[in-house]
Amino acid sequence: MDLTLFLQHLANGVSLGGLYALIAIGYTMVYGILRLINFAHGDIVMMASYFAFYGVAIFLIPWPISFLIAIVLTIALGVSIERVAYRPLRDAPRISLLISAIGVSLLLENVAVVLFGGRPKAFPRPPLFDQQWEIGGVKFSSLTLFIIIFSLVLLVALFILVYRTKTGRAMRAVARDYDTARLMGIDVNWVIAFTFGVGSGLAAIGALMWAMKFPQIIPLMGIFPGLKCFIAAVVGGIGSVPGAMLGGLILGVGEILIVAFFPEMANWKYLFAYSLLIIILFIRPTGIMGKEIQEKA
Amino acid sequence: MGRTSILGKVLTLLSLVVLFFALWWAQDNLNPYVQRIMNLIAINIIWAVTFNLVFGFTGQLSLGHAGLIAVGAYTTAILTLSPDQKSQNFFLAPMMSPLDQMQWSFLPSLIMAGILAALIGFVIGIPSLQFRGDYMAIVTLGLAEIIRVINMNLQTITNGTLGLKGIPSYTTLLWSWGAAVVTIAFIKTFVASSYGRALKAIRDDELAASAMGINVFRHKMLAFVIASFFIGIGGGLYANLLSTIDPNVFIFLLSYQVVTIVVLGGVGSITGNVLGSVLYVSLFELLRPIDGPLPIGPITIPGQPGMRMVLFSIIFLVVIIFYRRGLMGANEFSWDWLLTTLGVWRKKG
Amino acid sequence: MSILKVEGLTKQFGGLVALSDFSVELEKGELVGLIGPNGSGKTTAFNVITGIYKPTAGRVQLDGVDITGLRPDQITLHGIARTFQNIRLFTKMSVLDNVKVGHHLRLKSSFLSAGLGLPGYAREEEAIHAKSIELLKVTGLEDVAHEEASSLPYGKQRRVEIARALATNPKLLLLDEPAAGMNPEETQSLMDFILKILKDFDLTIFLIEHQMRLVMGICQRILVLNYGVTIAQGLPEEIQSNQAVIEAYLGVSANVNN
């Protein structure tokens, strides 16, 4: 394989990885603060895509506004889910919370089937994201550039939010020690709702990019990406935002390169993510950038 | 114990005899549609009771049921298909020998399904049982998916994405309910034993259980492997009921179905598992009409495919948020309770 | 030969040295106390001895067998049982079942035998039942045998924990603050109880306690920890007048003359 081809694959991998990263960040933020694997996150991605689709294709609203509305609606959806399905169970055993997340996921999928129909719909790709460029023999689209830019910008923005603002400090406090944070006068309910909002917003942006990259949307489209992005978050270090980005990149690049180097393994590429998960849980369960937690007796 | 012990055993035996004859009659007299539902109920009972063993009694959330069901289903399918049917199925690539010439009868195939599922369960258990609740859920989910992908790619063994057709319909009411009864009997006895206590101890407090001399990992694995054995048998019955296997059926949505049934019926209650299965499967069939247009008098409410599942999802969420203990909570049916309620004798003490 | 031989046991958590060079030898039948201000490493010592933590350095021998670094369940099999500072009963199980769990480790029947209800297992189950009832009688808990463990008052829960530990048939019993939260009357009956089981069950007992009346009353020997370091070891009278010990407790209201 020559250098150009390799770089091409690398570019594709980074593009895919950026997408995974955007969605993985949502998972990692919720897990960091609630110790909950939000099974419904992938389905929130799906809903965001449909919101945007209906805006542009059905209601014929210009795409910038549709996209914005979709993001806002998704944030509202995420916050509502937390309020209705997770908050009542905050004092229940953690497993109940997990099962509730599974329930929300199922509900979203089934509602989507009823509301939007099971047949795939074609997601619009505005010309801004459709430009094809070439540098040194490596082709990539403007969409790829936007994905990378957005991921980086959001990473920086999140960093500032979490480490340089009062809200961010509150978020970190709740993540570290829920009960003490409450005693310190932090409005925990608001902080958690805010975290869900941010996570959902990021998921929405990721969803829009995803739907433009893979323009066929169906109600069950969120399941596998959701699972893979969660794995990415774990690999990078659950609870760590840079970790989620790293995990997403590793997963994206890895998937592309494996198929590139071993074309006969194409069918098995789904195994890559799952295998990576098992391996990382054994070698370094807290993930690449995660922190060690020792439980006292 | 005491007064209910002998009476209880007699009543149980009597009920089983009645059940046997009822099923025997039903097999020849009830219409095939109803029989199919009853078979599905029995199979789901097996899956629910085994999930309950791992989750309700041992406290481990495994979402890998679908993978083990697949192992069981493929095993009986491969073993019970005749060589002719096999060559018909495997037109893309010939089946691997000696599998292509093998043909077993139902019982040995079922036992084999259980054994293979138990083995795979053991392999799955080694990594997954080392992790806490939420991680274990994801790991088992991932491993079940790995099994599914492997099944879809082993062209010469499972026929890959084409699936298998023409599997002999050996699953009758006596087989499925017989297996369900055996499963319930074994798990009930097992849970009532010292081993059951050890598992419950692990569920309540792993550290303390370990300090009392219980090898936590070994016992979790024990529960998991026993569960896998019976799950595999359930899977085998499933294959010989449906007569076709589509590998895409064994997706984690199937695992979620089992979780739903157990949550609805009551985690930690075998009676609850039975009730949950009956309710879920019957309701699923009964609600079929709302997926299509519903005529009510002069008005026709337009149906939508998928409304059923939406309703189920809502019920599921309502139960998990407000009635977490499900229908039965952790309570079991007992002859004592029934006889007392019926006023046949007064409450003891 | 001593029942318990601990040599140079050290436990470090990152930068914090919770236990430093802890050594002790217990002869069969001894009743030894471990005291020290809060956070001095007493429970850490117990946790390392019983395998809940792995030691950073040092050795533990039980009856001549090296049990250093073994799993807790393995160590219990060798013959050490314990109770916990914050009671750890199996909350959703009955008192009787809690005690029965203690017998599980010595079960000989296979799971198959248990699941099929074979006579071999049935016999063992009966024996477990009888032995557990016996233990409940000894600890005065017969009448609450079928109550849910978490529904009992604190004092009774402590006794269930002890009964459960005794069910494992230990050579050495570790009690972590058994008198916590007890009034003087309860403490007195606990003292009598501990002396009774020491004799009746042929035990060696190592206990952590803050209530000095109990410690000085029944312990034959006492070790004192402060910041993970053993600062004194000896007879109750010696410890009571030991300057270092008194200083360690200064500021802490330990009623030595309770």
Image: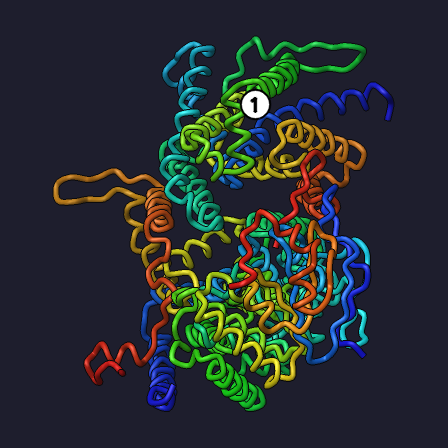
Can residue C92 be seen here? no
Q: Quadrant of residue A78?
A: top left
Q: Is residue A58 left or right of residue B62?
A: left
Q: Quadrant of residue C196?
A: bottom right
Locate residue B247, reporting x and y percent: 57, 51
Callout count:
1
The residue carrying mark 1 is A162
Q: Residue at x 45, y 15 (%)?
A: A68
Q: Nearer the viewer, residue A34 or C250?
A: C250
Q: Residue furthest left?
A: B298
Q: Chain of mark 1?
A: A
Quadrant placement of the N terminus of chain C = bottom right
Q: Is residue A14 above or below residue C153?
A: above
Q: Secondary structure at mark 1?
A: helix
Q: Is residue B324 left or right of residue B60?
A: left
Q: Residue at x 74, y 57 (%)?
A: C230
Q: Amino acid at mark 1?
A: Val
Q: Nearer the viewer, residue A44 or A84?
A: A84
Q: Is residue B204 left or right of residue C250?
A: left
Locate residue C177, reporting x and y percent: 56, 63
Can residue B272 be seen here? yes
Q: Nearer the viewer, residue C237 or B229?
A: C237
Density class for disc 1 (Cα within 10 Å; few <14, some 14-19, many ≥20) is some
